[in-house]
Image: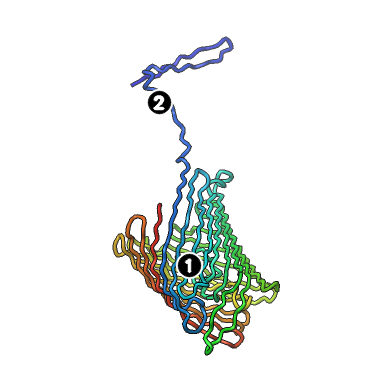
């Protein structure tokens, strides 16, 4: 083993200097090396999906002879970056559809997304400070009623069971989440949501003479929400939150503008019941500015995550904007259930079901949407890159407006191949 000796020298003024002498071999010396953490990492993930679909109602209206066979191709590209201070993802792509019976419906559309995690960067400024930003853009001529794995970019406010007729729709959803961890038990959080939908030209839809359909209005809508308050870790298993919420909805129908705003309070509780099961409950009330009308809002959910099975059940009661038929605030209630069971490492079964009722407030007789959806499916991983999906979806939609009601159903059978190069 090498040894280190030292020699102490005294100067004329009494000051001392110490010189260390390394007595081992030069090759034995191991100078200290300072590391700066893991190097930045960037991954590019391209993917493409090819889909064949039977659709019993491609126009989303009552009537007959509305079915078609549709081919969908969607190439996508995502770039993931993980640096010392910043993590993020940026992606985008296109979707093209070709219709056998209605070639006039053929289209090509674009989508894009951005996610930024700046928690580490802001942590350098002040310990415990965090910021996360996300934004999604989506264009489609067929606005969906419920969010699915293929339409997850649709902002939540516009996917609550309302099935608009076929029209070009541009949606954008932005989220800014700021937080400050005061201590391991207390965190202050504030979330800003900006959700927008803009409509272009509507698609001509043939109607059954026995059940004529009056073309409905499409309303450009902006819905903004700010939620702020503390989050308290009461026990290792329990988290309680107290929040103030402000909402503002804005409508634009051919230059005629209107809107509404609300303020309210929410109290939430989340508990990890078992290692696999988590329960969450939130409730509160809000008041409409101007009218002073009071509405209750809340949510409840159960989430199960195990080695072979994932399942969730949720209920939400909230205020959302109507972007179809009439620009008014809606009391929106929705129940959603989803489950996936992995039979083998390569094969899994899934099921999802949704029920929603949306009624105008304060006058519930003005506008009402009611819908439900059921979708069983299966997935098989053909190779490390390619996955196959087969699913069937059944929807029923009912709309009441101005004393007139009509309903229609829609069946789709979908076979999709997805290739993703991770």
For residue 30, the mark is: 2
**319 over 172 or under it: above or below:** below
Q: Position of residue 206 (x, y in %)?
A: 53, 81
**102 over 25 or under it: above or below:** below
Q: Mark 1 or mark 2, which is nearer the start of the sequence?
A: 2
**414 over 6 or under it: above or below:** below
Q: Give the image quarter of residue 328.
A: bottom right
Q: Position of residue 214 (x, y in %)?
A: 59, 83
Q: Position of residue 109 (x, y in %)?
A: 53, 63
* Closest to the observer, 298 or 334: 334
Q: Position of residue 314 (x, y in %)?
A: 46, 70
| Residue at screen point 40% across, 19% down | 4
Q: Residues within 10 Å of mark 2 (few under 14, many from 20)?
A: few
Q: Say left or right for 200 vs 113.
A: right
Q: Secondary structure at mark 2?
A: loop
* Closest to the observer, 77 or 2: 77
Name the residue at the left extreme.
344
* Closest to the observer, 83 or 273: 83
Q: Nearer the viewer, mark 2 or mark 1?
A: 1
Total number of numbered discs in the rendering = 2
The residue that label 1 is drawn on is 97
């Amino acid at each position: 083993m090498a040894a280190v000796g030292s020699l102490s020298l005294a100067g004329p003024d009494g000051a001392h200097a110490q010189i260390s002498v390394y007595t081992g071999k030069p090759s034995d010396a191991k100078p200290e090396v300072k590391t700066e953490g893991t190097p930045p990492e960037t991954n590019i993930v391209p993917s493409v999906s090819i889909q064949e679909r039977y659709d019993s109602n491609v126009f989303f209206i009552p009537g007959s002879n509305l079915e078609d066979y549709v081919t969908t191709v969607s190439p996508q590209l995502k770039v993931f970056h993980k640096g010392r201070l910043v993590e993020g993802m940026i992606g985008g792509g296109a979707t093209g559809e070709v219709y056998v019976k209605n070639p006039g419906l053929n289209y090509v559309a674009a989508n894009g997304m951005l996610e930024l995690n700046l928690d580490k960067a802001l942590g350098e400024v002040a310990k415990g400070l965090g910021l996360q930003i996300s934004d999604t853009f989506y264009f489609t001529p067929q606005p969906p009623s419920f969010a699915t794995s293929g339409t997850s970019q649709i902002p939540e406010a516009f996917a609550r069971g309302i099935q608009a007729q076929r029209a070009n729709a541009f949606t954008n959803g932005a989220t800014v989440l700021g937080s400050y961890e005061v201590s391991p038990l207390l965190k202050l959080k504030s979330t800003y949501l900006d959700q927008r939908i803009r409509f272009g030209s509507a698609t001509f839809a043939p109607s059954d003479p026995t059940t004529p359909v009056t073309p409905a209005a499409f309303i450009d809508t902006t819905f903004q929400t700010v939620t702020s308050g503390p989050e308290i870790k009461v026990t290792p298993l329990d988290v309680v939150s107290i929040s103030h919420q402000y909402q503002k909805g804005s409508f634009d129908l051919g230059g005629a503008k209107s809107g509404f705003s609300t303020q309210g309070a929410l109290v939430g509780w989340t508990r990890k019941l078992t290692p696999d099961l988590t329960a969450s409950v939130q409730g509160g009330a809000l008041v409409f500015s101007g009218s002073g009308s009071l509405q209750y809002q809340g949510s409840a959910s159960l989430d199960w995550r195990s080695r072979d099975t994932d399942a969730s059940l949720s209920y939400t009661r909230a205020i959302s904007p109507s972007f179809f038929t009439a620009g008014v605030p809606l009391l929106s209630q929705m129940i959603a259930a989803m489950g996936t069971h992995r039979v083998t490492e390569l094969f899994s079964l899934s099921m999802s079901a949704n029920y929603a009722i949306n009624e105008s407030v304060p006058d519930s007789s003005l506008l009402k949407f009611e819908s439900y959806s059921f979708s069983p499916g299966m997935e098989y991983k053909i190779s490390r890159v390619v996955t196959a999906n087969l699913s069937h979806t059944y929807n029923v939609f009912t709309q009441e407006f101005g004393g007139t009601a009509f309903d229609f159903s829609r069946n789709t059978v979908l076979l999709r191949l997805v290739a993703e190069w991770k």
